[in-house]
Image (cartoon, grey):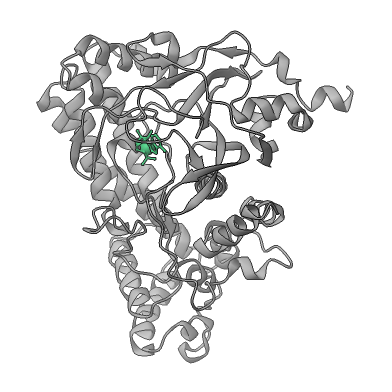
């Protein structure tokens, strides 16, 4: 077989279908992207091109740039913006929607997987409200990098295909420039998509949307008779959500804006704004500086996600009785706890399950917090702790001023390790496979953004490459693994994007 054929297909041969827009105009507005003036390609991700089955060399064609800038149509399929509602910071907003995201359609790859191709920042839609329909280069780079970083950490997320940029000015806290992010996901349906119809009393559409979600993404539920089918859908979403949040907590990821319109019915991380990876450990870390009350603080994420699942259950009330929904919602906490404890045991190199593990883990975070330990660096270092060395020469002790607290915890940890029936074998390498060396620290993203704003995309590419293999030591990349230099730690991230 020629290497050309194995690389994928030309753009023109991609099969683009209507996807979600087949539900009709009650669910979407048909809308073309607004052309982006004099666009240029800023980033391209061949991994996602491969998902869509197209040849990565296609990205060099002007046709590709026109497509990702929103300056050309993709065949006869009309593009669209979807309507939704949502609870934002606890208050219900009856009408939101894709105010700046336009979906070109849905591509089915050769393996039968389907992906919506969405342009974020592609101009105004019927749902733009007071916005300009645009995204700035800074925020598209942040989403591009974070979604790829999370994917490579094994966390379900939308993926990023490309960024098109332009010199067109966009007005935020200061003047920035416009960019369009191409992102893909099997679906961008949100909890808020259901809320939109429920709170208008449009229960037929709630059912249509639930049927669409089941047929496309949970087809095994078609074997479950109604009405239990919808309760099972709710349970699946609740469980996926619990597992998603457990994964965030285990890598120290704070989403920042966990409104119900940013919650995916597929359990994907969706809509990256003022997110942050924890560096100096602080359970109450708030990455979004507009979140004065700390509603979306790091340690509140598990509870908030449950709150959001309750909001989804309320929006499904016409399909799932309140009593049944309450029963289903009780699955959240055990699902979260199981997933979280499993991940945390892995991070600590524990293979077996012991009752006291939850307390051991909880107390570790207290110790880390008191010591202002860097989240990711700390867990990597912990892999080097030996059960046999004296407590006074362990490598991790350097993290602590108050060593007494550390020695007390690590004594318990050593005893716990010694209690594993296989003994303390190959723990270090196993821990290094689940504790990332490289996470997307704010100062790293910021350096890539500042270079890109000067039209130098090399740092963006380098950082993206590092984040593609977050568990592997990459020679020459030491600085990507360290806590930020003094003075850069406090980059505040706002909602404006
Ligand atoms: P987000 O905080 O990015 O999840 O957005 C919340 C809502 O505001 C969504 O309905 C977005 O489509 C909309 N939105 C955000 N930024 C803009 C913008 N610049 N123009 C139009 N709508 C926007
Ligand atoms: Mg959103």
Quadrant hosting ligand 1: top left
Viewer-side residue, 85 vs 320: 85
Furthest toward the right, the residue is 2
* Quarter location, residue 222: top left
Q: Quadrant of residue 1?
A: top right
Res 361 quadrant in image: bottom left
- Check the image and report above or below for 25 versus 286: above
- Percent coordinates x, y for residue 243 in the rendering: 37, 43
Viewer-closest of 402 and 442: 442
- Whether 457 is drawn above or below 263: the answer is below
Q: Position of residue 95 (x, y in %)?
A: 26, 27
In the drawing, does residue 6 fall left or right of residue 146?
A: right
Q: Residue at x 30, y 11 (%)?
A: 208
Q: Residue at x 49, y 68 (%)?
A: 379
Report the label total. 0
Which one is in front, 369 or 493? 493
On the image, the x and y values in percent for residue 455 come to: 69, 51
């Amino acid at each position: 077989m020629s290497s050309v054929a194995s690389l994928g297909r030309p753009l023109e041969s991609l099969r683009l279908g209507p996807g979600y827009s087949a539900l009709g105009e009650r669910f979407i507005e048909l809308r073309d992207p607004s052309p982006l003036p004099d666009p240029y390609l800023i980033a391209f991700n061949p991994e996602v091109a491969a998902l869509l089955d197209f040849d990565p060399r296609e990205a060099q064609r002007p046709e590709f740039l026109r497509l990702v800038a929103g300056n050309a149509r993709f065949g006869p399929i009309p593009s669209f913006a979807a309507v939704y509602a949502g609870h934002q910071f606890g208050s219900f907003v009856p009408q939101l929607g894709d105010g700046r995201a336009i979906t070109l359609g849905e591509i089915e790859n050769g393996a039968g997987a389907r992906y919506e191709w969405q342009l974020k920042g592609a101009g105004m839609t019927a749902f733009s409200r007071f916005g300009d329909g645009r995204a700035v280069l800074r925020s598209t780079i942040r989403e591009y990098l974070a979604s790829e970083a999370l994917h490579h950490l094994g966390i379900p997320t939308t993926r990023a295909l490309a960024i098109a940029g332009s010199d067109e000015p966009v007005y935020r806290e200061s003047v920035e420039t416009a960019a369009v992010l191409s992102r893909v996901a099997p679906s961008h349906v949100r909890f808020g998509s259901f809320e939109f119809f429920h709170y208008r009393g449009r229960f037929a559409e709630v059912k249509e949307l639930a049927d669409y979600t089941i047929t496309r993404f949970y087809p095994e539920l078609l074997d479950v008779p109604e009405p239990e089918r919808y309760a099972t859908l709710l349970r699946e979403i609740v469980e996926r959500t619990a597992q998603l949040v457990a994964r965030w907590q285990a890598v120290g990821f704070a989403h920042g804006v966990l409104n119900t319109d940013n919650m995916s019915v597929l359990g994907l991380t969706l809509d990256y704004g003022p997110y942050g990876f924890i560096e100096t450990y602080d359970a109450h870390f708030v990455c979004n500086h507009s979140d004065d009350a700390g509603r979306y603080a790091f340690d509140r994420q598990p509870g908030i996600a449950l709150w959001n699942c309750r909001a989804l259950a309320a929006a499904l009330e016409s399909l799932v009785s309140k009593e049944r929904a309450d029963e289903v919602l009780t699955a959240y906490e055990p699902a979260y706890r199981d997933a979280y404890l499993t991940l945390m045991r892995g991070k600590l190199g524990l293979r077996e399950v012991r009752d006291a593990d939850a307390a051991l883990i909880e107390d570790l975070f207290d110790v880390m917090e008191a010591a202002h330990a860097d989240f990711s660096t700390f867990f990597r270092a912990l892999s080097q702790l030996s059960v046999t060395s004296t407590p006074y020469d362990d490598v991790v002790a350097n993290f602590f001023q108050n060593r007494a607290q550390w020695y007390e915890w690590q004594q318990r940890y050593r005893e716990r390790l010694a209690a594993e029936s296989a003994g303390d074998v190959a723990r270090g390498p196993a821990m290094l496979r689940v504790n990332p060396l490289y996470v997307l620290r704010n100062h790293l993203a910021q350096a890539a953004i500042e270079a890109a704003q000067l039209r130098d995309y090399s740092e963006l590419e380098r950082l993206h490459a590092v984040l593609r293999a977050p568990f592997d030591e990459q020679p020459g990349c030491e600085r990507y693994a360290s806590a930020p230099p003094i003075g850069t730690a406090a980059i505040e991230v706002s909602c404006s994007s």
